[in-house]
Amino acid sequence: MAGLRLGPLLRHVDWESGTGATVWVEADRPCEAEVRCADGAGGTARTWRIAGHHYALIPVTGLRPGGETAYRVLLDGEQVWPLPDSPFPDSTIRTPAPDPAPGADATDRAPVRVVFGSCRWAAPPSDASHDPVGPDALDTLAQALARAPEAPRPDVLVLLGDQVYADETSAETRRWLAERRDLSEPPGEQVADYEEYTRLYYESWLDPEVRWLLSTVPSCMIFDDHDVIDDWNTSEAWQRRMRATPWWRERILSGLMSYWVHQHLGNLSPAELAADPLYAEVRAAEDGTEALREFAARADADPGYTRWSYRRDFGRTRLLMVDTRAARVLEEGRRAMLTDKELAWVREQAMDGVGGAPGLPGPDKPGPDGPGVASGGYEEGPDGGHREGGYDHLLLGTSLPWLLPHFVHDVEAWNASVCGGRRGGRWARIAEDLRQRGDLEHWAAFPESFDALTDTIAEVGGAPGAPATISVLSGDVHHAYVATPDWSRWPSRPPRSQVRQLTCSPVHNSIYASIRLGFRFGWSAAGRALGRAFRRHGRVPHPRLSWHKTGGPWFGNQLMTLTLRGRTAHLRLDQAQSDPSGGGARLVAALETDWAG
């Protein structure tokens, strides 16, 4: 009898028709995997094999728009989910209600609730009564939803990187690694191959609360550095050094392979999966390991070979998840956060439906995923207002913040200039050492890419059919804050959209005192003054854009929830705190704020 090794994860729910979804599972042997819903909907898929593991991504069809149905998972006809004696409610699939009739008030549409965060170190505490890094925010969210199944539930959980920590393993995982190999040999206590990566996913996704949460709330994911290694793809010199080590090739290939299996595939719609040649090859093969390994090798060698970024539309809310790790161009003198092709894709997807972008997919011009929305969806009315068009809210999911504390931004811009030779070879060598030691590799460390992203945001926000809000969702930096750009010095017409940088991390990780002090200083007037001195030394031009912190910084394990309705946005920051009454942990709101376009 086949057993359920990992999952189920509810991944993609179809917001266009409200009738389909996908569910990801890992079984312990080859089998037929089935999802059977209480309302008669369902689907089946045969497992496929990677490195001795058996996976299936099950397409569910026949769902009712605007409905909710419990589901079961069966392997070869035997039920394996829900687990016997589960303390949690049934896992369900909720589908969006159809849009109201044309001309209806925008507030008649149901809100879209997006919960997001990053950096979840999943290792359970050795002492069950005390977690040294504090309550896990995902666990706490799951407990809150399980206690109140009728309460508003997130429409999507957006995980912005560091879903697993390949370079920081738990004591239990280190004991398991020691049974496989000699930990005195590199990479030591870090993971080395695909099998060891699977251990990280088991440790993270078999957590009972998180397992139930991922089974009932759809999720979108993108990697950050720790999914492979700290500061992955910092610079050309970093990459040369890593590629010279004997263990790196197996590590990077295994990291990309395991990400494709566990995270990337579930991000895609059924139509995108059907058009994916690698997915077809892996499913058709007796063993897809070599095909996936070859793909990973090519993806690592050429940042333009594949696209990990993707688009999801939730009614009139558009999410663009942007790869800020594998798409980097690292050659000094040409450094870029994204390849030209990737940057063009981001712009095209953001402009699709808002007007002013010729040549985009439309009803008569299919895009890569089928027919799109015609450009020019909004028009300016006689009173300067707007008529309804493509979408109301743009979410840019990028693991690394676009707008950083001012001192940090200026130091990274200085570092990029000096590494590029603006102060001579000696300073370039010093700056490269600082870049690798100090994690100086955010958008600010790629100045042309920072400007290109800013230009894209300004273009979308200033288009005839600009969305009401543009939110850059980020993590990585182990604190939370809200930053708002100031367009007063912008050289062209400022955007109409309300633009925010929303940064939220960690979900569950330690917060060192030095980090708290450093980021508080980074936002301070003294930090800004010192940053200007760095800019002068590096001969860095004065930035065209300024910004200011409008919330935070907050430290702790936390999640943000963005609720989007009509052309309004509501943001709530919740921190996981131990319940003083002894009832486990609870989510406590540290911020609630609104804005509208």
Image (spheres, rainbow, N blue to C red):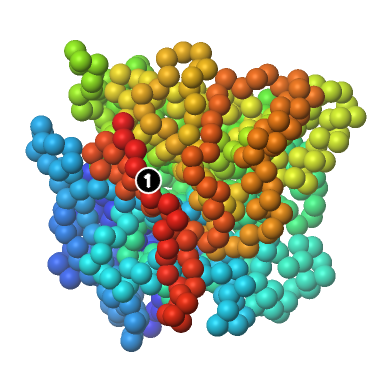
Q: Residue at x 88, y 26 (%)?
A: 425
Identify which residue is drawn at 57% across, 20% down: 544
Q: Amino acid at mark 1?
A: Thr
Residue 257 vertical placement versus 486 (above, below): below
Where in the figure is residue 275, as x and y percent of width and height? 37, 43
Q: Position of residue 71 (x, y in %)?
A: 25, 70
**Image point 70% across, 36% down: which residue?**
526
Q: Is residue 206 visible?
A: no
Q: Which residue is mark 1?
A: 593
Which residue shows up at 52% across the image and 17% down it?
Answer: 489
Name the image quarter holding residue 541: top right
Residue 38 placement (x, y as % from top left): 17, 71
Picture quarter containing residue 365?
top left
In this orientation, which residue lies closer to the viewer: 396 or 199? 396
Name the outermost residue toward the front. 525
- Quadrant where the C terminus is found in the figure: top left
Q: Is residue 132 above or below residue 410?
A: below
335 to the left or right of 119: right
Q: Tell me if I can see residue 544 in this picture.
A: yes
Q: Is residue 191 left or right of residue 573?
A: right
User: Looking at the image, which residue sits at the far bottom?
Assistant: 85
Percent across and percent down for residue 341 are 52, 28
Q: Quadrant of the N terminus?
A: bottom left
In front here: 90 or 361? 90
The local crowd at label 1, few if under 14, some if 14 to 19, many if 20 or more residues have their Cα within 10 Å, is: few
Q: Tell which of 250 and 393 is nearer to you.
A: 393
Q: How many marks?
A: 1
Q: Nearer the viewer, residue 508 or 300?
A: 508
Direction from residue 33 to residue 338 in the image, left or right = right
Element type where label 1 sits in the image: strand
